[in-house]
Amino acid sequence: MMTNRAAQTAGFLAAALWLAGPVAAQETVTQDAVALGPHQVTVTESADYNRLLSVDGQVLHEDGLILLDGAVEVAGETVVTGIAGAGGNACNATPIVVSLRDGAPRLDGPVDSCSWFERRVEPGRIVFYTEALPGMDAEIWHWTPADGLVAEGTVAFTPDAAEGWEGLAGLKDAHPLDALAFAPVYEQLKSGMSAEDWAIYSEILGQLGSGELLPGGYRGQACNKYICEDEWAMLWIDSASRTAVALWKRESDEEPKSFPDRATWPEWIGLDASEALNGAG
């Protein structure tokens, strides 16, 4: 049920995800030179330490980070896929496709997004897609020889209807956004919170974070890593009462917000939250 949030949350540790692979998610094998028919697609370093994407020495693109996956066959044509982006921690690099048009090299991409994309080769096309997460729709793009890279649309997150409270133990060491995606928790919080609060909370919870199982249930926390003390979110799940508790704060908020009413919180969650707030204060 759990996905690897460290690998797929947009916006944090982007360069590390592609260069070193996600935090124990998958290995990304890249190459500096890939054959495209009789041509050679290469990635080299510029004088100012940017990366240059070239075909037979002709520069097609310059960016802070460019990685090549390799060559694939699509509709009888050989193309080279990879990713390109500014690098750094703010945004993931996104898909590129190098192909030949009338013998001349053509570059499509990078995709205008900061999301982590996976690739799937289908008959006649390549599909690039992100994972749907709470508060974050999946993005889907496809590439064809005729149309290049085209945005196909988005798909909203849907929790696994088969998940029940008996699966709570599966949240051990889960990122808090994975815990929020746990069907009973997702349905409880999304249906009870306002649309605005849900959007803000799920967005913060999907950033740099961690979680653990405690004697009383689950606790997870995440924050905007640039302003971690001022913008953060926490999630508790009480196993006995099957209650989920959300606590969050944006940088612009004077005081943290929470759901549900604090009078209903299980005792251990109230104590844990007080300790967290006192520590943050």
Image: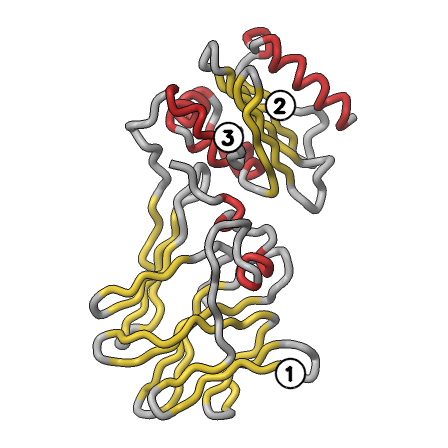
Residue 13 appears left or right of 141? right
Residue type indicated by callout 1? Ser
Q: Which mark is residue 214?
A: none
The residue sitting at 59% across, 36% down in the picture is 210
Q: Position of residue 155 (x, y in %)?
A: 33, 46
Residue to which mark 3 is pinned: 172
Does 187 appear above or below 28? above
The residue sitting at 50% across, 36% down in the picture is 177
CA–CA distance in space, label 2 to label 3: 26 Å
Q: Which mark is residue 46?
A: 1
Question: Which of the 4 image quadrants contains residue 245?
Answer: top right
Residue to which mark 2 is pinned: 257
Q: Which of the two discs, 2 and 3, labels the residue nearer the N terminus?
A: 3
Does 239 appear above or below 84? above
The crowd level at tag 1 (other Cα within 10 Å; few <14, some 14-19, many 20+) is few
Residue 125 appears left or right of 56? left
The crowd level at tag 2 (other Cα within 10 Å; few <14, some 14-19, many 20+) is some
Residue type indicated by callout 3? Lys
In terms of depth relative to the viewer, which is nearer, 65 or 34? 34
